[in-house]
Image (spheres, grey):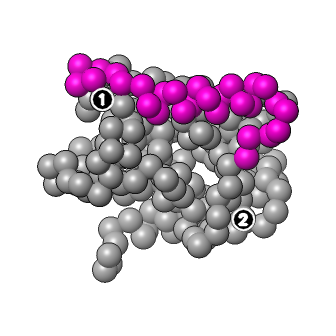
Amino acid sequence: MEMPPFEDHVEKGEKLWKKTFRNGKNYSSCFSGNDKTIRTQFPRWDTVKSRVETLEQAIIDCRVKNGEKKIGSGKGRLAWISAYLTTIAEGQVINVIVPEGDAKALKAYKDGKKFFYSKRGQLNLSCANCHVDYAGRRIRGDILSPALGHTTHFPVWRGKWAKSKGDGFGTIQRRYGGCNKQVRAKPFKRHRKEYNNQVGS
């Protein structure tokens, strides 16, 4: 895309990421490795909390841990920061690992897989119907993306979001909610197990 309309938001994300908290720390203090590898570490299984942890939730938790206020759950500043980390990690592999012998982690994986293949809403469609069965085909003006590798290119900028909801950026959690609405199903709350488990499966 020539002159993409979202570059300035990625730059805003970089500034926010590098900004010092009131206690003198910054986001990097909450994560292991260098900034360019952080995106590749998520989603992952949190053995302490027994849940799938997403990058966006880790960013929110980092803020709270350092005495800062929470930020939006699927767009705005959270999406900008996540987009910055995704951009600087381009070309690297995101390897989701289900820890061997951890029954809770395996259950979360299976629940996420079940969610992906379960039909819902008045249109009676599953995520797999679009992103496995019809990947690459058009649905109105959009091309249906393949399921494999979905997490690697989020957050995304969508013209639809730019027209009606602000700057156009959104996380994968925001997209899940949008897809649920489009099949006329009630969306789940962001960063809860239904969507988190799907990201990690």
Residue placed at 77% from the left, 58% from the top? 28
Which residue position holds label 2?
A: 37
Q: How many marks?
A: 2
Which residue position holds label 1?
A: 125
> Would residue 98 be counted in the magenta stretch?
yes
Question: What amino acid is labelled 2 in the image?
Answer: Thr
**Seen from this angle, which residue lies furthest bottom?**
2
Frontmost residue, 128 versus 142: 128
Residue placed at 78% from the left, 36% from the top? 46
Q: Position of residue 39 (x, y in %)?
A: 65, 58
Residue placed at 72% from the left, 30% from the top? 106
Residue placed at 85% from the left, 33% from the top? 101
Q: Position of residue 87 (x, y in %)?
A: 55, 68
> Which segment did they paint magenta?
97-124
Frontmost residue, 150 versus 13: 150
Q: Position of residue 107 (x, y in %)?
A: 68, 25
Q: Position of residue 19 (x, y in %)?
A: 67, 60
Frontmost residue, 86 versus 133: 133
From this view, report whether residue 5 is shown above or below residue 178: below
**Seen from this angle, which residue lies furthest front?**
133
Distance from the alpha carbon under mark 2 to that under mark 1: 35 Å
Q: Nearer the viewer, mark 2 or mark 1?
A: 1
Q: Please rate how many residues cluster around mark 2, counting C-alpha atoms within 10 Å: few if below 14, some from 14 to 19, many from 20.
A: some
Q: Please rate how many residues cluster around mark 1, counting C-alpha atoms within 10 Å: few if below 14, some from 14 to 19, many from 20.
A: some
Task: Determine which quarter of the picture holds residue 2.
Answer: bottom left
**Seen from this angle, which residue lies furthest left?**
140
Of the two numbered discs 2 and 1 on the same chain, state the one appearing first in sequence.
2
For the C terminus, the image quarter is top right
Question: What amino acid is labelled 1 in the image?
Answer: Leu
